[in-house]
Amino acid sequence: MKGKGLYIAAGVVFALALGCLFTGEVQSFCGGVILAAAFVAYSQWKKKHPVSKTSELRTIEGREGSKTIRETVSYFLIFPRKKTELVSIHSRHCPIGHSFGEWNEKVHRGAAQSDRFEKASHECLGLISYDVDSGTAKVSGSTGTEYTTTLDYCSCPDFDKRSKPCKHIYFLALQMGYTSDDFYNC
């Protein structure tokens, strides 16, 4: 129940409790009053604690760079649940030249690679986690499948078949601060 609904429910329960009092059922009256009071108290608590509250984005500085996270607090009844989500990574190892990882800059040329880069920019991919020490990320694909990805490798079928950067690798590179200029202005 939301907002006024809880107050209405409390009023109905209290009215029923009064009916019990007039019929001589004191225990039922006491139980009804307690239940009505609980509805009112819960309604007051809900006003102060919205169902879901997203905190501002935070940036955490680390040894190899920084990462931006979003924390969301939601409530199940009165119990808070905190969810932390990795939004982006900013590496101190900024791109030099026009390539990244072990790739030759020519690998990015061609319509197929341009398509993969566009998919990395526009499809619904997600960064689940990133290990700064190993440079390994868990990336959620557009179908929700989770892949292990670095700037040189991805566990997806496309990379396995072609051994060229896939959309997940380009997505990770974009999250680390690389831009299209680093791939296509050779």
Image (tube, rainbow, N blue to C red):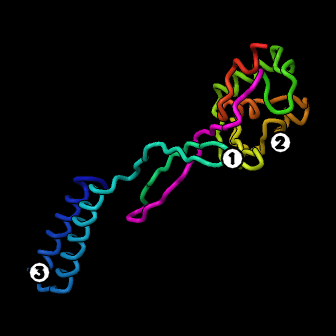
**Quarter occupied by residue 9:** bottom left
CA neighbours of label 2 inside 10 A, class few (<14), some (14 to 19), many (20+): some
Q: Is residue 144 left or right of residue 103?
A: left
The three-letter amino acid code for the residue at tag 3 is: Leu
Q: Is residue 131 left or right of residue 4?
A: right
How far apart, in angstroms, are the residues tagged by discs 2 and 1?
A: 15 Å
Q: How many labels, in total?
A: 3
The three-letter amino acid code for the residue at tag 2 is: Ser
CA neighbours of label 1 inside 10 A, class few (<14), some (14 to 19), many (20+): many
- Discs 3, 1 touching: Cβ within 8 Å: no
**Element type at mark 2:** loop
The quarter in which the C terminus is drawn is top right
Q: Which secondary structure type mostly characterizes the magenta part of the structure?
A: strand
In the drawing, what numbered circle is on residue 176? none
- Discs 2, 1 touching: Cβ within 8 Å: no
**Element type at mark 1:** strand
Give the image location of residue 111, x and y in percent. 80, 14
Q: Which residue sits furthest left?
A: 22
Q: Is residue 147 above or below residue 183?
A: below
In the drawing, what numbered circle is on residue 155? 2
Q: Which one is earlier in the sequence, the residue at label 2 or at label 3?
A: 3
Residue position marked by numbered label 1 in the rendering: 130
* Residue at the spot 44% in from the left edge and 55% down from the top edge: 74
Residue position marked by numbered label 3 in the rendering: 21
Nearer to us in this view, 51 or 147: 147
Q: Is residue 86 above or below residue 98?
A: below
Q: Is residue 34 above or below residue 103?
A: below
* Residue at the spot 79% in from the left edge and 24% down from the top edge: 99
Look at the image and give the residue range highlighted in magenta: 76-97
**Quarter occupied by residue 107:** top right
How far apart, in angstroms, are the residues tagged by discs 2 and 3?
A: 70 Å
